[in-house]
Amino acid sequence: MRLTLLSLAVLGSLTLVSCKPVPKEQATKAFIKELHLHFNNLNNEGQARKDELRKADAKLGLITATGSIYSTYLFDENAFVVFDYRCKTCETKLIIYSAETQYLCPSCGHCPYVQHGANFNRKESPCKLCLGTDGKPKEPNPTLITKEAFEGAKASVKPMFELTQENTAKPLIATVRYVRRQWAYDTRGVVDISQKVVERASVDMNYIPTDAQGVGRAPGFHRLDSTFVGEMEFEYRSGDIAVRWRRPEEAVRPWKDLKGNQ
């Protein structure tokens, strides 16, 4: 009897140990890992759609329809999204996502983070204040695009990953913000792009048409059609995530084409 009671006591102790909540840091890392897998899967679906759109059926003579679209997704747990930031030149309200640096205001074509003088040439875009020594729009001073700087400008700054329920004895809950880009198929391949676009958007080089001096490739390129910021709430339970709710995506006005700097 004593041996039985001792065995039951040991079993009960092991059960309590196994039910002990995992540390918050460990659970949060696992949560974020699953979120990256979620958005990577969405990007893989977009890549598959892009590949499918590029296939032409030689026998039937099918070609990809101009305007056919696919989407790519950006999520960075260390980044933030800025809403209702007013351009210091024209007062236009902008949406800015810190995972990438955006240079010129889509409304006035000048750097939205610095105050221009009263006599500057508004029609000259970008103006001398916005240009670097290489004659191209210069990257903003890092101190002007920090979370604190945007908050000081009375903009609404929200993290891309915001843990709202962190008690690991329960399912973790987080609000997640992301950027979705919608790409359209351009059969003429007339859109100029830069190396930075290729790097940031993970564009397949085979899809980029070359000029007359380059190696000949079939025409057609998926150009950036529009950009959206979305917000969703995820629940993390036992290694799996589930969407609790989502808000309608908000369109982001296209920032001015920087040619060699976008």
Image (spheres, rainbow, N blue to C red):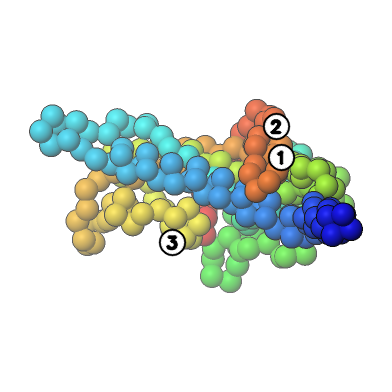
Question: How many neighbours does mark 1 have within 10 angstroms: few (below 14), some (14-19), or many (20 or more)?
Answer: some
Nearer the observer, 93 or 26: 26
Lower position in the chain sequence, tag 3 or tag 2? 3
Question: How many neighbours does mark 2 have within 10 angstroms: few (below 14), some (14-19), or many (20 or more)?
Answer: few
Q: Amino acid at mark 3?
A: Gln
Marks 2 & 1, CB-CB < 8 Å contact: yes
Q: Nearer the viewer, mark 3 or mark 2?
A: 2
Does dot 3 land on a helix, a strand or a loop? Answer: helix
According to the image, label 1 marks what residue? 235
Q: Residue at x 41, y 34 (%)?
A: 69
> Looking at the picture, how far across and down is residue 21, in whole percent?
81, 53
Judge from the rendering whether residue 22 lies leftward or rightward of residue 213; answer left or right: right
Q: Residue furthest bottom?
A: 133
> Looking at the picture, how far across and down is residue 2, in whole percent?
89, 58
Lower position in the chain sequence, tag 3 or tag 1? 3
According to the image, label 2 marks what residue? 244
